[in-house]
Image: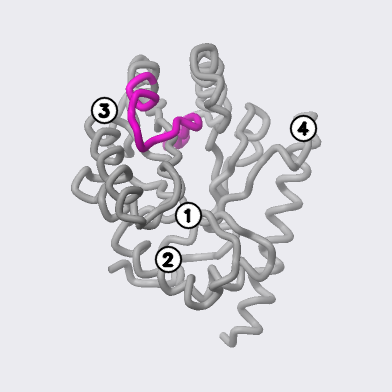
Amino acid sequence: MTPEERRAELSESLAAVRERLAKACHAAGRSPEEVELLAVTKTFPASDVALLSDLGLSSFAENREQEARGKVAEFAELRPQAARRWHMVGQLQRNKARAVARWADVVESVDSERLAEALSRATTNALETGERERPLDVLVQVSLDGTTGRGGCSPEDVHRLADMITRTSGLRLRGVMAVAPLGGDAAVSFDTLSSIFERLRVDHPEAVDVSAGMSGDLESAVAHGSTRVRVGTALLGGRRLTSP
């Protein structure tokens, strides 16, 4: 596929996703401006990110630090003047905190105090050395099915983790993130997340983001208050790269 053909394909997919979002927001009585579209570019090349940037997107997400590191650098070379915010949305090991702090603007998958501590140390160091210019925005990932296999802390631990994050010097609490359990009722899951978020905001009004909803369930997420949907397949298609 030529770059021109790929651009046309991505443009068509982006228009379709935006139409879905607009319809979902209308059905929920919300403005489309209330919901951010986050392009999940894992397994896709930096050239696709560059084309999406040309089409007006500025928020991109990765789920593996090793893949993201090179892609972020390559994209910066392809589009040095482009506005962009990079999100880490995958499960993150503490030993990757230092590397992530060098390229991520947002980490959405903070699910333990130990990980938050590691990210805080890494971010503070990166600020001191000039490797980044601002604190790291983070979301508390919540497990909605009682398991930790896909990441996330239990709903009962959200407040304690949020409190700890606000005491760090390098992190800024911005909200919550969750993935609807496989085989479950997405509406029930997102309603639960909405309740967790509203309780969190009582003590943490700075938490304004709800990252929920993907290609298959974004409508339900929007109906339950999501402010950011993470879309990969519906936007970019099937997997293109062999993961490093």
Report the residue marked by disc 2: 72
Q: Secondary structure at mark 3?
A: helix
What is the C-alpha distance between the residues marked 2 and 4? 33 Å
> How many marks overall?
4
**Separation of residues labelled 3 and 4 (CA atoms):** 34 Å
Among numbered discs 2 and 3, the one appearing first in the sequence:
2
Mark 1 residue crowding within 10 angstroms, few (<14) / some (14–19) / many (20+): many
Callout 3 crowding tier (Cα within 10 Å): few <14, some 14–19, many ≥20:
some
State the image coordinates of residue 164 (x, y, percent, origin top left).
33, 22
Residue under the point 45% across and 30% down: 173
Mark carried by residue 86: 1
- Which residue bears the numbered disc 4? 30
Measure the alpha-carbon separation of dots 2 and 3. 27 Å
2 and 4 marks in contact (CB < 8 Å): no
The amino acid sitting under disc 3 is Glu
x and y, in percent, of residue 112 in the image: 28, 29
Mark 1 lies on a secondary structure that is strand
Q: Earlier in the sequence, mark 2 or mark 1?
A: 2
The amino acid sitting under disc 1 is: Trp
- Residue at 68% from the left image edge and 54% from the top image edge: 17
Amino acid type, label 4 = Arg
CB contact under 8 Å: marks 2 and 1: yes
**Identity of the residue drawn at 43% across and 40% down:** 108
User: Is residue 180 inside the magenta stretch?
Assistant: yes
* Farthest bottom residue in view: 2
Res. 136 image quadrant: top left
Residue farthest along the left direction in this orientation: 95
Q: Please check the rendered image and state whether residue 226 is part of the magenta-colored stretch, yes or no.
A: no
Disc 4: CA contacts within 10 A as few (<14), some (14-19) or many (>=20): some
- The quadrant in which residue 220 appears is top right
Q: Which residue is mark 3?
A: 113
Mark toward the start of the polypeptide (2 vs 4): 4
